[in-house]
């Protein structure tokens, strides 16, 4: 709920834009905020700031800062305090600055119980905190929004800063920590030292991380350490099970690699939670049905949030996808309202299927249906073009319980 009185009294109002949805919401709420407080200075910061700068400027944002925004934001506050308002129209640095990291000040934030929490297999809940051991990413996956901003740059947050941040969250009631690094194993030595120290200090604390399939294979020797130190699950952006699509996305792994990583994690006692972008310009009805069947056959139903079965590829500003000739020739003009380049699948039936899958997920989740029943309904809709075949798992009760966040994570 918006605190209108606080808005009216503020000289600077900052919107954090770590994801596409947050940016859309910021553009919507900027109009409301300006209506309540016309003289207020609006600032946007985060990954999606520089990607959408011109549209944010047009919406009234005086300052647009990138994901390494802390020092620029502090300078902006000082300028406003000195009434140097003419200097507020700033971009931050043309290149990402190298910050001197400090322990985040979390005073004044809502209590952790108001954020997403972890649900463990026995049905109990764990209050979850959040921190980052690194920023940016060494890799250049073609569809990733991190790439146009960081361009392969990777920044390590000092170990003592990470641990101090976790300590203050544990003191505030955190029983679990989500590491928000784009890839926890970009700096595998740094990461494993942190979890070693974390487990020594807080042996009952659990955590989760995000790691590329490529890194799960290359650093598989570190998987037992993750389990030993309290890692409940690993999220990995698998995106597709079609090798040609994976090549176009420049993911650095194959379908076989994913299945191997799945086995390595299972053998280590670690839950792997894959995320997908099932609807791309190269998706076919057969490849989509095969994805659903693999999720069922590999006992991943509980590990894959239903929304993951309905996501359609987003092509944001400055996306590396535009380097592909077939994409450049397919997209329309940039949609300033949705902040994406619109595209239509060459086969309209696939776009219809994508829309149907999304409706099914929305309807079934509203009725609190199980992930297994949602998957089966989508499979029935997707496999109508087949003359034979049946859903791989006839009983929804076969889906095993796995630890997961109460709010699904996806790009």
Image: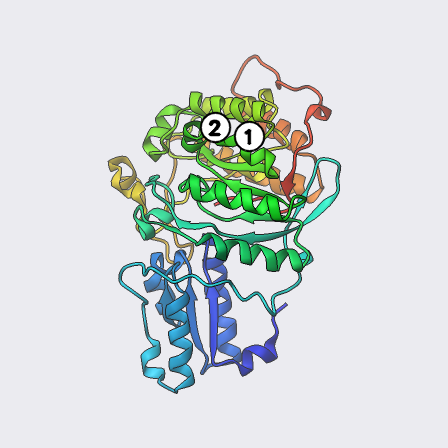
The image shows residue 399, relative to residue 191, as above or below, that is: above
Tell me if I can see residue 135 in this picture: yes
Image quarter in which the N terminus is found: bottom right
Q: Residue at x 43, y 20 (%)?
A: 256
The answer to whether the residues at label 2 and label 1 have Cβ atoms under 8 Å apart is yes
Report the front residue among 288 and 146.
Answer: 146
**7 versus 56 height, above or below:** below
Residue 144 rendering spot, x and y as whole percentages = 38, 44
The residue shown at (33%, 59%) is: 98
Q: Is residue 357 visible?
A: no
Residue bearing mark 2: 221
Residue placed farthest to the top in the image? Answer: 388
Task: Say which residue appears at 27% left-offset and 59% top-offset.
Answer: 95
Residue 245 location (% of width, % of height): 37, 29
Q: Residue 170 at what x, y percent from top left?
A: 64, 55
Residue situated furthest bottom in the rendering = 83
Judge by depth and name the residue closer to the eye, 156 or 150.
156
* Residue where numbered disc 1 is placed: 224
Identify the residue at horizontal 32%, vertical 32% (top origin): 248
Quick one: label 2, few (<14), some, or many (20+) residues within 10 Å? few
Residue 387, picture quadrant: top right
Front residue of this view, candidates 291 and 102: 102
């Amino acid at each position: 709920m918006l605190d209108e009185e606080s808005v009216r009294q503020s000289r600077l109002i900052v919107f954090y834009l770590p994801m596409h949805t947050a940016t859309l919401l910021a553009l919507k709420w900027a109009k409301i905020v300006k209506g309540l407080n016309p003289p207020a200075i609006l600032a946007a910061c985060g990954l999606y700031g520089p990607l959408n700068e011109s549209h944010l400027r047009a919406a009234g944002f005086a300052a647009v800062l990138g994901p390494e925004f802390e020092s620029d934001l502090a300078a902006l506050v000082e300028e406003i305090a000195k009434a140097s308002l003419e200097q507020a129209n700033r971009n931050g640095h043309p290149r990402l600055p190298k910050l001197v990291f400090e322990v985040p000040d979390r005073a004044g934030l809502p209590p952790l119980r108001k954020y997403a929490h972890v649900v463990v297999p026995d049905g109990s809940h764990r209050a979850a905190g959040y921190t980052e051991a690194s920023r940016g990413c060494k890799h250049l996956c073609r569809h990733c929004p991190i790439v146009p901003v960081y361009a392969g740059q990777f920044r390590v947050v000092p170990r003592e800063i990470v641990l101090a941040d976790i300590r203050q969250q544990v003191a505030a009631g955190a029983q679990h920590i989500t590491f928000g690094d784009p890839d926890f194993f970009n700096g595998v030595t740094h990461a494993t030292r942190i979890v070693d120290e974390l487990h020594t200090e807080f042996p009952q604390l659990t955590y989760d991380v995000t790691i590329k399939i490529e890194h799960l294979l290359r650093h598989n020797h570190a998987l037992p350490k993750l389990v030993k130190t309290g890692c409940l699950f690993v999220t990995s952006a698998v995106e597709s099970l079609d090798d040609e699509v994976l090549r176009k996305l420049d993911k650095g792994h194959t379908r076989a690699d994913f299945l191997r990583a799945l086995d390595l994690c299972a053998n280590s006692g670690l839950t792997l939670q894959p995320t997908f972008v099932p609807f791309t310009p190269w998706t076919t009805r057969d490849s989509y049905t095969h994805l659903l069947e693999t999720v069922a056959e590999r006992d991943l139903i509980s590990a894959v949030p239903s929304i993951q079965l309905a996501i359609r590829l987003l092509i944001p500003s400055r996306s590396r996808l535009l380097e592909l000739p077939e994409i450049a020739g397919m997209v329309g003009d940039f949609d300033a309202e949705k902040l994406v380049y619109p595209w239509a699948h060459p086969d309209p039936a696939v776009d219809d299927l994508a829309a149907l899958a999304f409706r099914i997920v929305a309807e079934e989740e509203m009725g609190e249906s199980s992930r297994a029943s949602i998957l089966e309904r989508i499979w029935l809709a997707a496999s109508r073009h087949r003359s034979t075949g049946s859903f791989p798992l006839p009983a929804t009760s076969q889906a095993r319980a796995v630890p997961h966040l109460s709010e699904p994570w996806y790009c």
